[in-house]
Amino acid sequence: MVLIFGLSSIPGSTLANIEFPYAHPIAHSILYGMFYYLCYRALNHRRLGRLGHFSSLLVAFLFVGIYGMSDEYHQSFVPGRTEELKDVLIDLSAALVVMAAIVLVKKLRDARSLHA
């Protein structure tokens, strides 16, 4: 969260025009995908009291969405930056991709343990 906040605090005029195509959505996807995974792990950690697998997936998704919206709102106060709904949608899409990967890996592990 600190990394995302710090990056979104950089004024737009300071950001160099990156020649790499789709750099902005790729950066959002990587940051928010990792953020979702870390939130899910924190919620699903055994020593913290399991919410349950599905609840952990859902609560992490909601938290990432709320944080993404608050980050876009924060950017509206940073010179040269704007808030954009598409960025929140990219953030949520990244969270959904990671969520699907978590569910797939869990299903594969469960299937493997049944056959062992």
Image: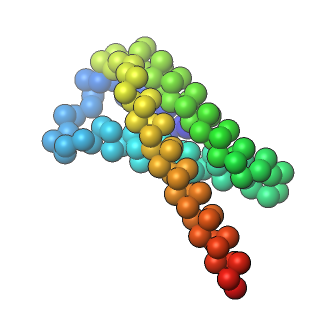
Direction from residue 83 to residue 44 in the image, left or right: right
Q: Is residue 71 above or below residue 37?
A: above
Q: Is residue 7 visible?
A: no
Q: Is residue 64 visible?
A: yes
Image quadrant containing the N terminus:
top right
Q: Is residue 11 above or below residue 22?
A: above
Spot occupied by residue 39 in the image (x, y as percentages of width and height) = 63, 45
- The residue that appears at 59% across and 39% down in the rendered structure is 61
- The residue that appears at 50% across and 44% down in the rendered structure is 96
- The residue that appears at 44% across and 40% down in the rendered structure is 93
Q: Is residue 30 above or below residue 78?
A: below
Spot occupied by residue 91 in the image (x, y as percentages of width and height) = 45, 37
Direction from residue 86 to residue 2 in the image, left or right: right
Spot occupied by residue 94 in the image (x, y as percentages of width and height) = 45, 44
- How is this picture coloured? rainbow
Between residues 65 and 13, which one lies in front from this camera angle?
Answer: 65
- The residue that appears at 45% across and 23% down in the rendered structure is 72
Outermost residue, left direction?
Answer: 19
Q: Quadrant of residue 20?
A: top left
Spot occupied by residue 74 in the image (x, y as percentages of width and height) = 48, 20
Image quadrant containing the C terminus:
bottom right
User: Total label count?
Assistant: 0
